[in-house]
Image: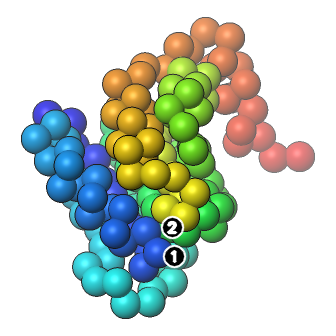
């Protein structure tokens, strides 16, 4: 069974719990919070999850907020994180194949529950192709 980290803000709380509930037989989730719909600051949860991903290369995660934009921006500040905001399963597949994404970001206000489930399943089942894509990834951490 796959293990995946998951976190949200208050806007993504419901979708986070739906993913955990619907996929509990296929995926082992480590829920990093929040644990209620009370208002929270998304950067706190994006950082909490991204720090863990940054330090362990074999981990994958899911971040969920209203649009997914804020979570993506925070997560991608970490050197070993490649967070991909996806709104359909094709984007999820390509984010893994071409970009070796290790965090799937979902916007709860922009995606249906069914499409979110499809995105996560495809994300976890798709392998990185490497090859010509690696040279591009190697440029991610270059400083001008």
The residue that label 2 is drawn on is 65
User: Which residue shows up at 51% across the image and 83% down it?
Assistant: 41
How many numbered callouts?
A: 2
- In the rendered image, residue 87, in percent from the top left (x then y), is placed at 57, 44
Q: Kindly tell me whether residue 103 is visible in this rendering.
A: no
**Left or right: 36 with respect to 78?**
left
**Left or right: 114 with respect to 43?**
left
Q: Check residue 22 in the rendering and tell me which mark sits there, or answer none.
A: none
Position of the N terminus, as image quadrant, is: top left
Mark 1 closeness class: few <14, some 14–19, many ≥20 residues within 10 Å: many
User: Which residue shows up at 32% across the image and 77% down it?
Assistant: 34
- In the rendered image, residue 105, in percent from the top left (x then y), is placed at 51, 52
Q: Secondary structure at mark 1?
A: helix
Q: Check residue 42 in the rendering and tell me which mark sits there, or answer none.
A: 1
User: Which residue shows up at 20% across the image and 45% down it?
Assistant: 23
- Whichever of callouts 2 and 1 sits on the residue coming sooner in the sequence is 1
Mark 2 closeness class: few <14, some 14–19, many ≥20 residues within 10 Å: many
Nearer to us in this view, 90 or 29: 90
Q: Secondary structure at mark 2?
A: strand
Q: Which residue lies most toward the left here?
A: 25
How many angstroms separate mark 2 from mark 1 (CA)?
Answer: 7 Å
Tell me the mark number nearer the camera, choosing from 2 and 1.
Answer: 2
Q: Kindly tell me whether residue 22 is visible in this rendering.
A: yes
Q: Is residue 143 above or below residue 34?
A: above
**Left or right: 4 with respect to 80?**
left
Labelled pair 2, 1 in contact (Cβ < 8 Å)? yes
Q: Is residue 124 above or below residue 102?
A: above
User: Which residue shows up at 59% across the image and 33% down it?
Assistant: 91
Residue 134 lies in what quarter of the image?
top right
Q: Which residue lies most toward the bottom here?
A: 38
Q: Which residue lies most toward the right here?
A: 144
């Amino acid at each position: 069974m796959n293990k995946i980290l998951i976190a949200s803000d208050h806007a993504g709380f419901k979708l986070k719990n739906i993913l955990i509930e619907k996929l509990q037989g296929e995926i082992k989730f480590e829920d990093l919070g929040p644990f209620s719909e009370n208002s929270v600051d998304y950067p706190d949860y994006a950082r909490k999850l991204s720090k863990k991903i940054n330090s362990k290369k074999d981990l994958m995660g899911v971040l969920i907020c209203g649009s997914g934009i804020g979570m993506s921006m925070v997560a991608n500040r970490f050197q070993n994180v490649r967070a991909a905001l996806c709104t359909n399963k094709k984007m999820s597949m390509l984010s893994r194949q071409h970009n070796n994404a290790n965090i799937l970001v979902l916007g709860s206000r922009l995606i249906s529950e069914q499409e979110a489930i499809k995105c996560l399943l495809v994300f976890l089942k798709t392998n990185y192709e490497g090859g010509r894509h690696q040279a591009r990834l190697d440029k991610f951490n270059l400083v001008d």
